[in-house]
Image (tube, rainbow, N blue to C red):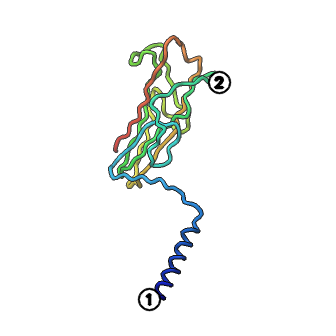
């Protein structure tokens, strides 16, 4: 009996030694979903993980760049996080900048994204990404920059503000 206690005591010392020998503990962010879910939206930075971003944006404003005399929207990204096995289609589309939304006018301003990620996106054409896989590994993340530059010479009327709508649509294929 005494020998068993002595062995148990030494084993406990060994376990305590190994627990105390750990230098640091790093937190791990883990997120699980059981539904066939898709998260999508706009954010201020590129999304690379399946953790839903906290810095979502619903409204952006142009800033003036005196370097090239233009109005720009930068640091805007779309993101799609899909937890589905099926193929999806991502469509980004937008309207021209208008002073009276929904009413065509000579003051309307067409625009185009100059980012490599979304160079096909403009107020006149959509950016479309279509998955074509036999089997998909999921979850999957898609994200890309939207960078819009409008030369000041294209702005004909500054008496009222301009607005436009950018739409992100994710559908199953």
- The secondary element bearing badge 1 is classed as loop
* Circles 2 and 1 in contact, beta carbons < 8 Å: no
Q: Residue at x 49, y 34 (%)?
A: 120
Q: Residues within 10 Å of mark 1 (few under 14, many from 20)?
A: few
Q: Compute the Cα span from label 2 to label 1.
A: 87 Å
For this rendering, which residue is in front, 1 or 75?
1
Indicate the quadrant where residue 88 lies: top left
Q: Quadrant of the N terminus?
A: bottom left
Q: Residue at x 45, y 23 (%)?
A: 164
For this rendering, which residue is in front, 127 or 158?
158
With respect to residue 168, does 3 lie above or below? below
Q: Residues within 10 Å of mark 2 (few under 14, many from 20)?
A: few
In this view, the mark in front (2 or 1): 1
Q: Residue at x 49, y 13 (%)?
A: 160
**Residue denoted by label 1:** 1
Q: Position of residue 57 (x, y in %)?
A: 47, 33
Indicate the quadrant where residue 93 lies: top left
């Amino acid at each position: 009996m005494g020998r068993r206690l002595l062995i148990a005591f030494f084993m406990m010392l060994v376990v305590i030694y190994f627990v105390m020998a750990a230098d640091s503990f790093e937190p791990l962010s883990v997120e699980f979903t059981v539904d066939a879910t898709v998260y999508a939206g706009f954010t201020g930075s590129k999304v690379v993980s399946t953790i839903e971003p906290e810095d979502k944006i619903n409204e952006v404003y142009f800033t003036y760049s005196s370097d090239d005399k233009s109005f720009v929207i930068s640091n805007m990204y779309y993101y799609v996080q899909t937890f589905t096995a099926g193929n999806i289609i991502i469509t980004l589309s937008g309207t021209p900048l208008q002073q009276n939304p929904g009413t065509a006018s000579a003051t309307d301003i067409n625009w185009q994204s100059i980012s490599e990620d979304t160079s096909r996106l403009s107020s006149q054409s959509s950016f479309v990404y279509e998955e074509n896989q036999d089997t998909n590994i999921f979850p999957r993340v898609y994200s890309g920059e939207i960078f819009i530059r409008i030369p000041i010479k294209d702005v004909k009327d500054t008496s009222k503000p301009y607005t436009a709508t950018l739409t992100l649509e994710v559908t199953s294929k």
